[in-house]
């Protein structure tokens, strides 16, 4: 089922830079427009409880001003549910959230949080919002995601990106195994977290994946060569990996 692989660009850390000094610059909505022009297929933004980067107004503007689908990452709290229901993003990705963490540390334990997540997913789905669960690449977590009624799972690629080269093959195998399990259970399968120019190709080549969500690395690279350049290069690496995997890349 190797085919086109969507790229969701997370613009959180454009807002991080803005918030470091206050004011309106740089504007994450402007970054989202540039991402759309540069090959992104969707925009991802994580509205955190402490509002450390993306703000409520950013979410409203992204939904109203950007033509691409909006993927709202959020914790499964009543406050965030109400915001999602009011804003109506195209997708919601439920993620774990700890106030003290610098970034998301691993996936949701959906098996342990079944009773908490089930009514949240039902409310969002009833409102016509597609729901994804951000999980570690594990067959049990995938199976529970299906049982909970999620539309998608997003596999956490952070461990794959962080391990040494010697350990990367085993982590890639875990991602492949979980992606196969997801598709076998009729779940759309995405992946993301920590992906870079150096690590993206083997993940992009996994045929069961339909979308990668990448943000921090692209915003960091934008400092050196521009956001459009970093997105276009990532888009090309993903496309080439897919072409190689399907044997369709020209010699």
Image: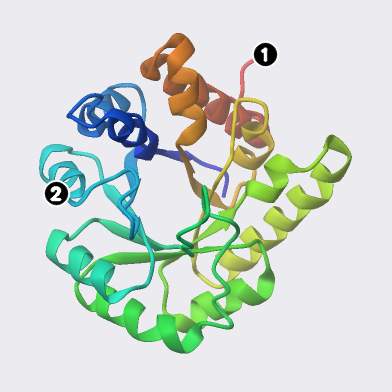
Identify the residue at image location x=45%, y=63%. Answer: 95
- Image mark for residue 251: 1
Q: Is residue 43 visible?
A: yes
Identify the residue at image location x=59%, y=69%. Answer: 184
Q: CA distance from mark 1 to mark 2?
A: 46 Å
Question: In the figure, residue 24 lies in which quadrant?
Answer: top left
Q: Is residue 236 left or right of residue 117?
A: right
Q: Quadrant of the C terminus?
A: top right
Q: Residue furthest top?
A: 225
- Image mark for residue 60: 2
Q: Residue furthest bottom?
A: 115
Q: Is residue 211 above or below residue 72?
A: above
Which of the marked residues, 1 or 2, is nearer the chain's N terminus? Answer: 2
Identify the residue at image location x=70%, y=49%. Answer: 159
Q: Residue furthest right?
A: 166
For label 1, the SS is loop
Q: Residues within 10 Å of mark 1 (few under 14, many from 20)?
A: few
Q: Is residue 163 left or right of residue 91?
A: right
Q: Is residue 208 left or right of residue 47?
A: right
For label 2, the SS is helix
Q: Is residue 235 visible?
A: no
Q: Is residue 241 above or below residue 251?
A: below
Q: Residue 36: percent from the left, percent from the top?
A: 28, 29
Q: Residue 172: percent from the left, percent from the top?
A: 74, 48
Return the residue nearer the eye: 102 or 200: 102
The total of numbered circles placed on residues is: 2
- Image mark for residue 71: none
Q: Residues within 10 Å of mark 2 (few under 14, many from 20)?
A: some
Q: Is residue 195 left or right of residue 212?
A: right
Return the residue nearer the eye: 36 or 2: 36
How did the renderer colour the structure?
rainbow
């Amino acid at each position: 089922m190797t085919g086109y692989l969507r790229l969701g660009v997370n613009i959180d850390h454009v807002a991080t830079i803005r918030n470091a000094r206050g004011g309106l610059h740089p504007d994450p909505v402007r970054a989202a427009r540039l991402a759309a022009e540069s090959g992104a297929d969707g925009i991802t933004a994580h509205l955190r409880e402490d509002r450390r980067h993306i703000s409520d107004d950013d979410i409203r503007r992204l939904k109203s001003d950007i033509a691409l689908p909006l993927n709202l990452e959020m914790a499964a709290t009543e406050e965030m549910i109400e915001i999602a229901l009011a804003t109506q993003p195209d997708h919601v990705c439920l993620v774990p959230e700890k106030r003290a963490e610098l970034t998301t540390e691993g996936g949701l334990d959906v098996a342990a949080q079944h009773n908490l997540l089930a009514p949240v997913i039902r409310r969002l789905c009833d409102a016509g919002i597609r729901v994804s669960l951000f999980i570690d690449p594990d067959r049990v977590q995938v199976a529970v995601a299906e049982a909970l009624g999620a539309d998608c799972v997003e596999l956490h690629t952070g461990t794959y990106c962080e391990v040494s080269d010697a350990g990367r093959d085993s982590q890639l195998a875990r991602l492949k195994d979980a992606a196969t399990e997801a598709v076998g259970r009729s779940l759309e399968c995405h992946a993301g977290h920590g992906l870079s120019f150096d690590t993206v190709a083997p993940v992009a080549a996994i045929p069961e994946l339909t979308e990668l969500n990448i943000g921090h690395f692209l915003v960091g690279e934008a400092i050196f060569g521009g956001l459009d350049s970093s997105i276009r290069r990532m888009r090309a690496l993903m496309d080439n990996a897919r072409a190689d995997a399907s044997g369709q890349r020209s010699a």
